Image (spheres, rainbow, N blue to C red):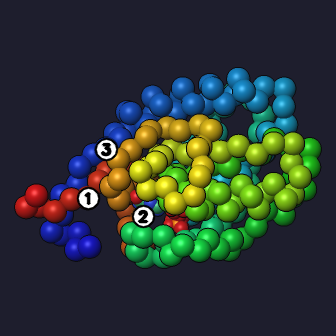
């Protein structure tokens, strides 16, 4: 993708994201009140979303990070998910909530949730900012979703293209200038 020959179309503005995160934060706080909650955030893409989301919780929470990788520099999943860095803590007493920026093919979230279940937590659910159900390759239906989006490659707010643009504070779609 030659980014200079493209236009950026905003899909989720900073205001859209901020408003939706307040709702999600409240919903998740209500669901896990009086439960031991452990957020497992999937690096690198989820660092922005996780930082903003957990600050909307009004309940105590432990937070740790796993690093997963499947896309490399491209716009298509390699089909195989690698856990580059795993959780070290014993999760047996905890309700785990996996937080990621996007569920696309679903391969990453399915693989990580299956992996975390082997650590015998009380429960495992997931929360994603963006859900792209048209691209699913495995069956997975995220428990908490910020926005359901069409089948477009999206960038910004943690999501990268060629390792850039993660720092853009909104989500945008890149399209051809002459379309
Ligand atoms: O549903 P899927 O098709 O598996 O795609 C979703 C995953 O792909 C991206 O991660 P990536 O492997 O690109 O690593 P990154 O988090 O470092 O960007 C994204 O952050 C999700 O974790
Ligand atoms: O649409 C996307 N954009 C950026 N990274 C991604 N990883 C999976 N899908 C996407």
Q: Quadrant of residue 54?
A: top right
Q: Which residue is mark 1?
A: 174
Q: Which residue is mark 2?
A: 160
Displayed-image quarter of ligand 2:
bottom left
**Residue at disc 3, secondary structure:** strand
Q: Are marks 3 and 1 in contact (CB under 8 Å)?
A: no
Q: Which residue is drawn at the image coordinates 71% and 55% (left, top)?
A: 113
- Choose between 47 and 133: the one closer to the eye: 133
The residues tagged by marks 3 and 1 sit, at their Cα atoms, a distance apart of: 10 Å
Q: Quadrant of the N terminus?
A: bottom left
Image location (x, y in percent) of residue 4: 18, 69
Q: Quadrant of residue 88?
A: bottom right
Q: Is residue 145 visible?
A: yes
Q: Which residue is mark 3?
A: 11
Q: Which residue is drawn at the image coordinates 76% and 45% (left, top)?
A: 124
Image location (x, y in percent) of residue 62: 78, 45
Q: Are marks 2 and 1 in contact (CB under 8 Å)?
A: no
Describe residue 36's horizontal placement relative to residue 148 as left or right: right
Q: Is mark 2 within 8 Å of ligand 1?
A: yes
The residues tagged by marks 3 and 2 sit, at their Cα atoms, a distance apart of: 15 Å
């Amino acid at each position: 993708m030659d980014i200079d020959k493209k236009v950026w179309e905003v899909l989720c503005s900073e205001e859209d994201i901020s408003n939706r995160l307040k709702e999600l934060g409240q919903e998740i706080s209500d669901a896990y009140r009086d439960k031991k909650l452990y957020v497992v955030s999937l690096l690198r893409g989820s660092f922005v979303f996780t930082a903003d989301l957990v600050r909307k919780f009004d309940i105590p929470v432990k937070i740790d990070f796993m690093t997963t990788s499947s896309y490399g520099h491209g716009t298509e999943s390699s089909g195989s998910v690698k856990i580059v860095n795993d959780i070290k803590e014993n999760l047996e007493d905890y309700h785990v909530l996996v937080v990621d920026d996007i569920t696309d093919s679903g391969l990453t979230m399915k693989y990580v949730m299956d992996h975390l279940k082997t650590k015998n937590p009380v429960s495992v659910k997931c929360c994603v900012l963006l859900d792209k159900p048209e691209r699913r390759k495995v069956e997975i239906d995220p428990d908490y979703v910020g926005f359901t989006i069409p089948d477009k490659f999206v960038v910004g707010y943690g999501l990268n293209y060629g390792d850039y643009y993660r720092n853009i504070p909104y989500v945008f779609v890149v399209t051809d200038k002459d379309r």
